[in-house]
């Protein structure tokens, strides 16, 4: 095969440059403007040498694969990549294991007559094969490579079962049969194929190479090559990345070509570059129309004809229209002008010529334009959207953009005003549907509204539509970059957001964080829990916080680690944050926190450090910060932070320093032990200690700590109102000491937790008398999981019935209660005026108790909730329980 002839033929292939179609591939290759588009593997391999489409194809063909499917979106560079393969082969640079390479655009195959032999197909379309080479070629199929471009547009089925596959290269057969026989290996078995298509192909198997097109670095090279002046290249690229870079189609080389071409013209004319996709397409259409020098009414007619064609192509899933169809749409007088708007396959003069849109985007923009132009196109926007539902992606966005005068003005100057009734119709629908959607709680639907508002670029419209009733705090986790841009636009227009909920954002990227930075700084409450923040995202979060109004930040379960947290702290030193949730953030150091808390500008009051392996040493460091007059911390949550008695001295010193504002410390599930409590008890008696709440749940305590606690509670300086000693083996003796302290007149304790403390009936008897004493301030008592049974709890029921008892919440879960207690229980509720909540889970109450319990709840004015879950009820009583909505069962 004569490679020079192949080269000349491919490089001299005709083709025209159009704004929407691009530069012909031959011209791109000839002028050394070819930039390798990337394939999907590019994202997982080392970014310094990502596989380009060419490399991926070469690699696939070097293996066992005989068929490579190059799949990519419209304009992603498939044709250009195939032509480049042919050129490289013909120049002797690549694929030299093939002696014969045949390149067929599928439209050529589509135009072939009904029957043909393989030999004549090759001879006819690649006349540069000398006749004497044909037998050799046929003998050595493994030396042959076929390239079929746009195979998805093949008019016939490639299903092998619908063809009688042939194997004789000299025998004439229907062309569709030849194609199926070649691709399914019955004809020229052993030949290799590279086929291109927009989506996956049915009935073909092989290696799929997905073309991604141009990612950021390729776009940069492309813009630099397009604009000779680097300043303009940079300006254009930055603008595109900022305004459109979040859309997938920006990776399409054809789209880049169109953007560069239109930007260049606008820049040369000293005009503003478009801010939205709608504006970009307005500029494109204006440019194309101006070149035609038509009058206003002809332009309107042409756009309407394009609109009819667009609707037809969209509804019938037609990629191409015949000349006859074009005439029916009203193109007669414009047929010679359409080459600028449409892809024309074949000779304009020929009846076989086929017309199609270069891109779905343009098709949808034309649809939107024609809606506003011509009332007869569709009665009402709702019907229009319904009609094209599932077949369009950007139609509503374009409608929204075009409904705003500023965006459509350049177009109106050219073709006159758009139909005001249609505009009103759209606006009415837009407002009412958006308001309704935003009342719901569906993230995707909210985002669609934000996109529509973004296209409209009308700040007052945003404020009018998004009122305070819209539940904007719903979870917007895992937003796409596009969604981030639209949300950010909306929030920036509103000026503030109560709650930015990004819960469960699996990968908060640097780009997303950068885009959302203004939104973050305008949000009072930010939820990023259960998320994963990339290293690049953290500085953006930090700087958003440092400038912003955020008072609450939830980073729980983000497993940040010390390094990222250190970067975040740069933003925490000078911000309005009052509550910070760092639960399960994989932190081991407190160094940065100390510098935040002592910065003098930190407002942090509540710090949740639960489930971080802090350990004593880091905690001792943190306690030093509590001595600082700048530290405003009031609540410190330290559950499971690997603390021991060794750090309680440092905590106590801070609490007694007179400088600490700390009111609440939760030490749940740390090894505080009796000696730790001894230290803390001393501090509780100190006149400068302001601690009100101490949670010592499951902290390895025994009765030995109780004398110290008793002493503390007896002290007139003790300000504790909450003490939780649950899940510690205090036992009878210890607990009785505590009861003694509780009966001290003036004891300020209001909440007491003694769940699973090995309490006995005697302790309950004492607790009962404390509650009845008239001096106790106890409002909440948790004595669950102490197996004292009906007899033990009877002391509590009796106390609840007593007028001096102030209890509002009582938890007697799993205390072995039976139906026998119900009479006392009901009597207590009836007599009591303060109790609101009663926890009775996991006891042995049965169906017989239900009528009394339901009745007492129905008659009670103060009871808000009774929890009867996990008792021994049968389904028979569910209806009765259902009668009272304050009962949970
Ligand atoms: N690798 C490239 N380097 C520079 N420009 C390119 C490249 N690939 C494509 N282009 C530009 O993009 C335009 C469209 O590319 P091409 O026709 O190859 O895309 P395609 O994926 O085959 O499109 P379609 O899906 O419509 O068949 C070309 O005309 C050219 O201007």
Image (cartoon, grey):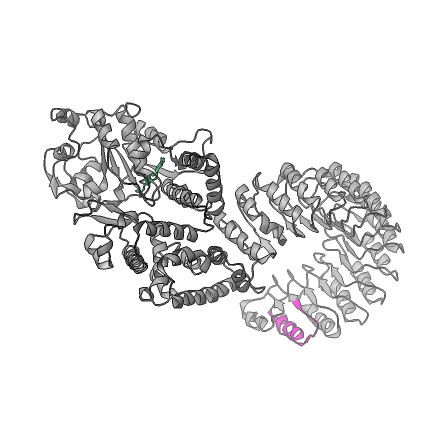
Q: Dividing the image into four equal quarters, which quarter contains ligand 1?
A: top left
For the N terminus, the image quarter is top left
Q: Determine if the magenta segment contains residue 853.
A: yes
Name the one closer to the observer, 304 or 433. 304
- The answer to whether residue 389 is visible is no
Q: Residue furthest bottom?
A: 859
Residue 882 location (% of width, % of height): 57, 71
Residue 808 location (% of width, % of height): 74, 66
Residue 322 location (% of width, % of height): 21, 52
Residue 146 location (% of width, % of height): 23, 33
Q: Is residue 10 above or below residue 436?
A: above
Q: Residue at x 39, y 51 (%)?
A: 281
Q: Determine if the magenta segment contains residue 670.
A: no
Report the side of 176 relative to 863 (left or right). Answer: left
Secondary structure predominantly adopted by residues drawn in magenta:
helix
Q: Is residue 774 above or below residue 74?
A: below
Name the one closer to the observer, 205 or 730. 205
Which residues lie in the magenta part?
845-865
Quarter of the image for residue 793 reads bottom right
Total number of numbered discs in the rendering: 0
Q: Residue at x 31, y 64 (%)?
A: 377
Name the one closer to the observer, 9 or 299. 299
Q: Residue furthest left?
A: 171
For the C terminus, the image quarter is bottom right
- The answer to whether residue 324 is visible is yes
Quarter of the image for residue 718 reads bottom right
Report the side of 819 relative to 226 (left or right). Answer: right
């Amino acid at each position: 095969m004569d490679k020079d002839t192949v080269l000349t033929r491919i490089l001299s292939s005709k083709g025209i440059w159009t704004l929407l179609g691009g530069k012909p591939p031959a011209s791109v290759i000839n002028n050394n403007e070819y930039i390798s588009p990337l394939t999907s593997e590019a994202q997982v391999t080392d970014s310094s040498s990502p596989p380009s489409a060419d490399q991926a194809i070469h690699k696939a063909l070097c293996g066992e694969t005989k068929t490579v499917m190059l799949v990519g979106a419209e304009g992603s560079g498939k044709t250009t990549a195939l032509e480049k393969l042919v050129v490289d082969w013909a120049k002797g640079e690549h694929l030299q294991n093939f002696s014969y390479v045949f390149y067929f655009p599928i439209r050529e195959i589509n135009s072939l007559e009904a029957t043909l032999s393989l030999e004549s197909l090759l001879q006819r379309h690649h006349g540069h094969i000398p006749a004497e080479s044909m037998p050799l070629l046929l003998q050595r199929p493994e030396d042959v490579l076929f390239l079929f471009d746009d195979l998805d547009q093949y008019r016939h089925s490639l299903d092998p079962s619908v063809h009688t596959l042939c194997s004789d290269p000299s025998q004439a057969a229907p062309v569709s049969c030849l194609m199926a026989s070649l691709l399914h290996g019955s004809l020229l078995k052993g030949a290799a194929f590279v086929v291109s298509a927009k989506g996956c192909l049915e009935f073909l198997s092989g290696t799929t190479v997905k073309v991604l097109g141009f990612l950021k670095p390729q776009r940069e090279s492309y813009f630099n090559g397009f604009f000779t002046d680097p300043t303009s290249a940079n300006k254009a690229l930055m603008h595109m990345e900022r305004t459109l870079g979040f859309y997938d189609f920006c990776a399409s080389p054809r789209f880049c070509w169109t953007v560069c071409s239109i930007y260049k013209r606008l820049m040369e004319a000293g005009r503003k570059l478009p801010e939205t996709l709608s504006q970009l397409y307005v500029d494109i259409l204006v440019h194309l129309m101006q070149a035609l020098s038509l009058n206003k009414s002809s332009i309107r007619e042409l756009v309407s004809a394009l609109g009819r064609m667009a609707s037809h192509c969209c509804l019938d899933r037609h990629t191409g229209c015949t000349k006859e169809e074009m005439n029916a749409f009203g193109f007669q007088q414009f047929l010679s002008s359409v080459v600028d708007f449409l892809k024309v396959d074949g000779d304009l003069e020929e009846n076989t010529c086929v017309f199609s849109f270069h891109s779905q985007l343009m098709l949808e923009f034309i649809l939107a334009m024609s809606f506003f132009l011509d009332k007869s196109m569709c009665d009402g926007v709702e019907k229009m959207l319904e009609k094209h539902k599932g077949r369009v992606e950007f139609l509503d966005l374009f409608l929204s953009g075009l409904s705003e005068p500023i965006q459509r003005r350049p177009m109106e100057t050219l073709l006159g005003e758009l139909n005001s009734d249609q505009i009103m119709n759209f606006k009415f629908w837009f407002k009412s549907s958006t308001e309704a959607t935003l009342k719901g709680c569906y993230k995707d639907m909210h985002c669609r509204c934000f996109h529509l508002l973004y296209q409209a670029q009308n700040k007052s419209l945003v404020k009018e539509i998004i009122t305070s009733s819209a539940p904007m705090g719903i979870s917007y986790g895992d937003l796409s970059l596009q969604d981030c841009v639209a949300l950010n636009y909306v929030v920036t227009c509103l000026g503030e957001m109560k709650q930015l909920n990004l819960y469960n954002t699996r990968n908060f990227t640097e780009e997303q964080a950068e885009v959302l930075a203004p939104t973050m700084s305008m949000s009072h409450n930010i939820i990023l829990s259960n998320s994963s923040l990339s290293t690049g995202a953290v500085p953006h979060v930090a700087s958003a916080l440092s400038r912003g109004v955020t008072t609450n930040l939830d980073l729980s379960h983000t497993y940040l680690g010390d390094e990222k947290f250190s970067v975040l702290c740069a933003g925490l030193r000078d911000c309005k944050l009052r509550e910070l949730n760092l639960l399960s953030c994989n932190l081991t150091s407190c160094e940065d926190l100390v510098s935040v808390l002592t910065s003098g500008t930190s407002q942090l009051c509540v710090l949740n450090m639960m489930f971080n392996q802090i350990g004593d040493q880091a905690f001792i460091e943190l306690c030093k910060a509590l001595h600082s007059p700048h530290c405003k911390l009031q609540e410190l949550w330290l559950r499971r932070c690997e603390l021991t008695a060794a750090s309680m001295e440092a905590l106590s010193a801070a609490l007694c320093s007179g400088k600490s504002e700390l009111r609440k410390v939760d030490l749940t599930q740390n090894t505080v032990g009796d000696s730790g409590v001894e230290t803390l008890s001393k501090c509780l008696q100190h006149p400068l200690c302001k601690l009100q709440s101490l949670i010592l749940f499951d902290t390895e305590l025994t009765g030995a700590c109780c004398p110290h606690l008793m002493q503390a509670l007896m002290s007139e300086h003790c300000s504790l109102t909450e003490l939780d000693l649950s899940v510690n083996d205090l036992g009878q003796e210890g607990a009785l000491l505590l009861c003694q302290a509780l009966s001290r007149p003036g004891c300020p304790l209001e909440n007491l937790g003694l769940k699973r403390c090995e309490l006995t009936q005697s302790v309950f008897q004492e607790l009962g008398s404390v509650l009845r004493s008239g001096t106790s301030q106890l409002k909440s008592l948790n004595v669950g999981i102490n197996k004292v049974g009906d007899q033990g709890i009877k002391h509590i029921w009796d106390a609840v019935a007593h007028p001096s008892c102030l209890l509002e919440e009582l938890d007697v879960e799993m205390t072995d209660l039976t139906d026998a207690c119900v009479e006392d229980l009901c009597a207590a509720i009836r007599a009591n005026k303060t109790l609101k909540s009663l926890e009775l889970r996991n006891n042995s109450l049965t169906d017989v108790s239900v009528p009394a319990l339901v009745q007492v709840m129905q008659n009670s004015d103060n009871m808000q909730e009774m929890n009867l879950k996990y008792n021994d009820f049968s389904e028979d009583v569910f209806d009765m329980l259902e009668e009272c909505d304050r009962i949970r069962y």
